[in-house]
Amino acid sequence: MTSLPSLWWELLDQPITPRPTLERHLDVDVAIVGGGFTGLWTARELLRRDPTLHVAVLEKELCGFGASGRNGGWASGLFPVENETVVRHYGLDAFHHQHHVLNDAVAELGASAATDGIDARFAHGGTLTFARSEVQAQRLEKEIDRARALDIGPDDLAWLDADELESHGTVAKALGATYSPHCARIDPARLVRGLSDVVEGLGAMIFEQTAVTRILPARRGRRAEILTVGANVHADFVVRATEGFTPNLPGERRTVAPLYSLMVATDPLSSDFWNEYGFNNYETFADDRHLVIYGQRTTDDRIAFGGRGAPYHFGSSVEQRFDKNSKVFRMLETTLRELFPTLDAPVTHGWGGPLAMPRDHSPFVRVNYETGLASAGGYTGDGVVLSHVAAIALADLLTSPDTETAHTRLSFVQHEGRRWEFEPLRWLGINAGLGLATWADRVEERRGRVSRASSLLDRLFD
């Protein structure tokens, strides 16, 4: 299996040459910690609004090294908080506004990449969530009913029966699927590396292999400050865009929980295989099990397939050795071959990395005008599109603080969520949730009924 961060990195056209390390003190308008989607989209949006801004991006490894260059390549309008919860906390109008912004953002992301000349392998084919048992079918049908109760029509979320799947794609034992057009397949490494080049071309200074040791708020007439081993950066605003690596910073251990999501990929598959299963429009796919899985057909006709299942590590630890887990890789391959029984190609790649889950599952975009500190993240695996939306909101807040925009009105903008519990409660709760999800799926598969673990899982994370 490849030693690169992901299959996507191996498929890049050119080898990566690291940009310079920060070795001198800087004074800038905006300094961004993190060279992934959030940090780079934010730099792009700031400089498109005001090309005279001095913007610096500091990345510990290489731009896109984290989740931005390793994810499943779903550019979706998904939001990690249930619709009913958003309605309960913010109202129906706020929900509909957010729903439309996120759905529209899928095409807007593709248009942004195209405008910048980035070939991100963007294919707007939608997404299928299969029902592979009666229990899953009943659960998905209830999801449709809940969507209709919130005035979400069939153009946004539809039920497809087994016959209707023929025009999209299918997997073994599929009884039907929900279909949403609001998802595109991308190659994430191509997008993030291309974006780093675009941002640099707009005038941003990007420093790679530059580890930030501390972020200090503005105080007593001094501006906000970033500390690194070699040099410091002063800025009017410091944006923290560190997602799953956030707990490595002082004082941020309980801000988000780093959950590891792992992936595998096959060799390119034959035309006979794809004639059998479809996915000719590069629809992304999953099923309705509790332990999340996700997959896509790549441009070179592989399957890139991932899922949860790796344990949460005590103390919100984030280490490179956690990126690979042979047990989870075997589980993913087994699941993949269950979905596609005639798959005879080998699994050639395996990789993983941390995503960031807030305690209330809600993403956040925050700007504190007194301290000069800003942040965005907490996407719980839905960050490709959410990072683009969050960056627009951040740029609006930083450049036009007195003007309300469509993006600053979103429910998660200036949202202050709960911090995670202290250890060992965090470790016990998250891994208990993992165990309950595994148990619930096993009961549904073997006994054909809903497990009590399903309701326990909901109560644990409510």
Image (cartoon, helix red, strand yellow):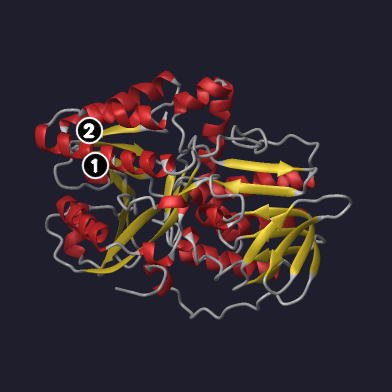
The residue singled out by tag 1 in the image is 438
Q: Residue furthest front?
A: 424
- Of circles 2 and 1, the one toward us is 1
Q: How far from the left and from the top, in percent, is residue 95?
A: 54, 27
Amino acid type of the residue that numbered disc 1 sits on in the rendered structure: Thr
Circle 2 SS class: helix
Q: In the image, what residue occupies the spot 20% across and 28% down?
A: 450
Q: Nearer the viewer, residue 366 or 456?
A: 456
Q: How far from the left and from the top, in percent, is residue 100?
A: 54, 34
Q: Which label was assigned to residue 136?
A: 2
- The answer to which image quadrant residue 94 occupies is top right
- Pick the quarter of the image with the N terminus: bottom left
Q: Is residue 418 above or below residue 87?
A: below
Q: Residue furthest top?
A: 149
Q: Is residue 407 above or below residue 324?
A: above
Q: Nearer the viewer, residue 372 or 155?
A: 372
